[in-house]
Amino acid sequence: MYVVRTGGWLVGLAALLAAVATVSAGVGPVAIPPREVLSVVLSALPGLSTDAPGAHQTIILRVRLPRVALAAVVGFALAAAGTVMQGFFRNPMADPSIVGVSSGAAVGAVAVIVTGVSLPFGLGLPAAAFAGALCAAFGVYVIASEGGRTPVATLLLAGVAVQTLLGAVVSFALVHAGRGIREAVFWLMGHLHGSTWGKVHLVAAVAVPLILLLLPFTRDLNALLLGEADAQSVGVDVERTRKLLLAVASVITAAAVAVAGVIGFVGLIVPHVMRLLVGPDHRILLPTSALAGAAFLVAADAVARAGAAELPVGIVTAAVGAPFFLYLLRNREVPTA
Amino acid sequence: MTDPALRVDSLVVDRGGRRVLDGVSVRARGGDVVGLVGPNGAGKTTLLRACTGAVGTESGEVRLAGADAATLSARETARRVASVPQEPSLDFEFPVREAVAMGRTAHVSRFGRRGPEDHTAVDRAMERASVFDLADRSVTAISGGERARVLLARALAQDTPLLFLDEPTANLDVNHQVRTLSLVRELAADGRAVVASIHDLDLAARFCDSLVLLADGRVRAAGTPEAVLTPKALADAFCVDARVSRDPATDSLRVTVLGDCDSTGADGERAVERPSSGDDTVPVPRTDGRGTD
């Protein structure tokens, strides 16, 4: 029963993602109709060819597709991590960065931009952001832990405090940023600018295996919704499971943030919407949220590129996401417990 | 002789720098319903939690069906003892059937799926707790009494030789109180050991084989309801002036509280009327009001 339902949702969302991706790859200074996009993509298969002009083929394969793919993986990663964090904290306001991942990444990224340090292949920025993200998350965890236990409320508050502190560090760096300020601000807004297949592979290599690793823990996530004591009493090793979930979700988020900056709202809103649609069971919620997150970010990125001047995609996700979320809040029952 | 389902020896638990349990020993065998009674804050809930490993212990030993609880994993523990919590935390819209099926967590491998025996166990548990008709309803859309039964069903689905109930009757009306405890008796008759904390002394006396009277983290009295519910012990534990009589309808003990232990009126008359040759009851003494310190 649940297999059929899950399968149905996954097929539907995958189709939606494919459709959104096809349209999105056609959006930009050179508009390319979806049919042509499709024929170029399918020409990669043996035995199929395309009659699209060579310039269009180059634009699609070298510029647009890496970007669409990056949007998809980043959205996938953020929504999956957000789902895990909301379940973990039993808190509707939890997002993937709740333990300071994004703030840590921001410090790392801004530090690199301001100091002008660089590594080969442009890896300096993502590497610094990734490292900053993990340091922040681990720091929050250590601060909130005492005697082998990590109370959820303490973790939440420690996360807020550390985010505030790191926010101050970033602001300070920006004040002294000089010429780097424009790049830094752009990064902080969340962007998919300068997407390459290399970045796609980087995020996918981290996020996809880790999300697959989460799937066997979806039943434990369900049990955690019962509360710590109940989860323990039905046989979940609460402390160990939580440690693992927190670590995995943080690394997934860190990978996404490292290449795409702080793209807000995807990890907060997508799990909520999917919970309204498919219910709270993580066995179906986690994979569907991940796919829906991918489709949402690809669509948001298409909007960001549609205007005369490209917008950072973070602006679009927040501008679309926030009103939509408010609408849900007023008209549907978003679980707030 | 087989190991009892639960054996607690000299258990000591500190929480927040305060000694909450101080050398508590309890036994429960298959077929027994053991009632934990005592004033608020006596340590009843802590005792149940310490036995499942949810609360750390300072010293003493908990054995679940012979195995040292301290060495068991969460999963192994959950196959030996199921708990029904006092406050249901069912905020998310799971169908009742799914909420009950969570009781199978310890029986299903992480990478496996629930098998036929799991579905049978879930169905049986729902049947037993009379929530079968609610199977497809959301746990957020049923009444408080129904939720309490769903949690009981979840514990039954765990299929354990030992069952802990924390105040199973606390939020129920009189009808459901009696129905729930009658079901608990049946569960014990199946061979399970049941340990339940119960506030209502009359219900505890009526449905339990033995009682453990806790106050201030210590066992004040343990044994049959007749041996435990004496005016002296009640005065000692609850600081009340109480009379114990027999209920003509149920033939079980009935505790009537006349007032605070400081109030007058308990001046030595025979407080327990027993039809047979009562001997282990004593007149109600006045205590000094410190009672449980």
Image (cartoon, coloured by chain):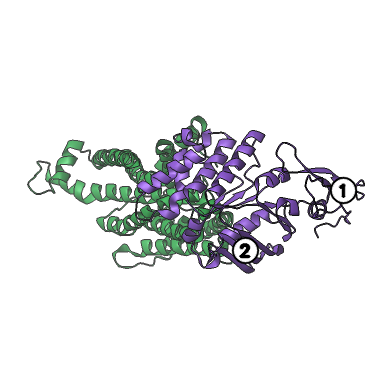
Residue B136's spot in the image, x, y percent?
A: 44, 34
Q: Residue at x 65, y 61 (%)?
A: B26
In this view, the residue in front, A48 or B170, is B170
The image quadrant of residue A52 is top left
Q: Quadrant of the N terminus of chain A?
A: top left
B194 shown above or below B218: above
Residue A118's spot in the image, x, y percent?
A: 35, 67
Residue A104's spot in the image, x, y percent?
A: 47, 60
Q: Chain of mark 1?
A: B
Residue A21's spot in the image, x, y percent?
A: 26, 42
- Of all residues shown, which one is farthest toward the bottom? B59
A190 shown above or below A135: above
- The chain letter of the green chain reads A
- Of all residues shown, which one is farthest toward the top? A331
For residue A265, say whether it is visible.
Answer: no
Q: Are marks 1 and 2 on the same chain?
A: yes
Going from N to C along the chain, the mark reached first, 1 or 2, is 2
Q: Secondary structure at mark 2?
A: strand
How many neighbours does mark 1 have within 10 angstroms: few (below 14), some (14-19), or many (20 or more)? some
Q: In this rendering, would B203 be left or right of A34?
A: right
B94 shown above or below A86: above
Q: Which residue is mark 2?
A: B8
State the separation of the CA atoms marked 1 and 2: 35 Å
Q: Colour of chain B?
A: purple
- Mark 2 residue type: Val
Q: Which residue is mark 1?
A: B270
